[in-house]
Amino acid sequence: MGHTRLFSFSSAFFWSLLLLSQLIITLAGAQAAVGPVGVGVNYGMIGDNLPTPEQVVGLYKSRNITGLRLFDPNPAALKALERSGIRVVLGTRNEDLQALASNASFAAAWVNANVLPHAASIRFQYITAGNEVIPGDLAGNVLQAMQNLDAALVAAGLSIPVTTVVATQVLGVSFPPSQGSFSQSSLPFMVPIVSFLAAKQTPLLVNVYPYFAYSGDPKDVPLDYALFNAKQPPVIDGGLSYMNLFDAIVDAMYSALEKAGGPPGLQLVVSETGWPSGGGGLGATVENAQTYNNNVVAHVKSNAGTPKRPGKALETYLFAMFNEDQKPPGTEQNFGLYHPDMTEVYHVNF
Ligand SMILES: *[C@@H]1O[C@H](CO)[C@@H](O)[C@H](O)[C@H]1NC(C)=O
Ligand SMILES: *[C@@H]1O[C@H](CO)[C@@H](O)[C@H](O)[C@H]1NC(C)=O
């Protein structure tokens, strides 16, 4: 056959491709064994009666919770996380944002103090500059802080994505999902952040709380829809139908990203979601919290994605591991999966 020569010439290439693809499959398999991108849990520490970080990390491991978000670089928590195999989202304190943004040496010192000593023993998933500061007085620092942290990480020889965490308050329009867009007060901050993240192929982190949408507007937001229990698609948006509010909120954010110039590949990570089990708020019951959190875990683990991004894994972190007694009184103190004595408030199947 006339192609024989070409075939034999290319067979070496073919075999090397095959080996390469097997290597990639093996690597992907190894990563999946460590813990697929799935459901992590926020480790909030605003309590005076919480277990030690060693006990907390032990609890995560005993439950096979493979991801953890830390709100600030707590040294004892970072020490306890070393060699745990848990992937860690590490935040900067909002109080440090201005210095991180205006002083590259401060950002380098932050990386050298909080990341570099643990880099060989902790898998840092993201470093986040700022939590829910857009819009607001600190919003103007976020991009520069991200840039300085990124440069400091590169200078330290580390390859860890840098991003920020936003609340859905960045949205001016959130319904229907296809109309989602950033508010006029957020847009000037979000556009350059979106472009930074797109260039680095790093996701934006967003806190998603169907609970607050429901409790703030129970007449228009059915409880079943917020709890992933709707029997009929209650929201039809163009060609897409929404069975739950979680997906509708995530897709409103995707619409806003697109309108702010984000490419289709720019991803979201849900850095917080949860439901209070008490504290007096409307619908804040153990039963609803258990229903919501189990349903969100099952939804995320199914890799169904959202109607706008079907079949796309959505990395998600529940809020939070513990009830935190030094948060504002009421529902805020009751988002934990666990009591401070490490007994379950209710069971979540991970
Ligand atoms: C955690 O994962 C291991 C290994 O897959 C399994 O044997 C164990 O039962 C799991 N534990 C829990 C609490 O799910
Ligand atoms: C910048 O940060 C470095 C390192 O923390 C600090 O020594 C220096 O004083 C800071 N410069 C200013 C102008 O704040």
Image: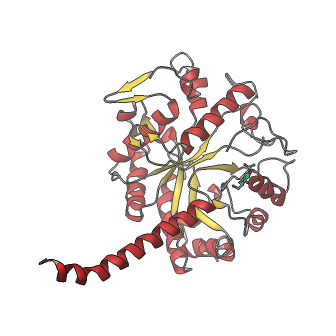
Residue at point 69% right, 52% down?
Answer: 65
Q: Position of residue 142 (x, y in %)?
A: 51, 58
Depicted 71 relative to depicted 220: above or below: below
Q: Count the numbered circles shown.
A: 0
Q: Quadrant of the N terminus?
A: bottom left
Residue 55 seen from this side: yes
76 lies left or right of 137: right
Front residue of 154/36: it is 36
Q: Is residue 241 above or below residue 205?
A: above
Coordinates of residue 160 in the picture (x, y in percent): 54, 68
Quadrant position of residue 219? top right
- 2 vs 317: above or below: below
Figure quadrant of the C terminus: top right
Q: Does 197 sit left or right of 11 as displayed?
A: right
What residue is drawn where x is 67% and y is 23%? 283
Q: Is residue 285 visible?
A: no
Q: Residue furthest left?
A: 2
Taking 73 as reference, is 264 above or below it?
A: above
Residue 286 figure quarter: top right
Which picture quadrant has residue 241? top left
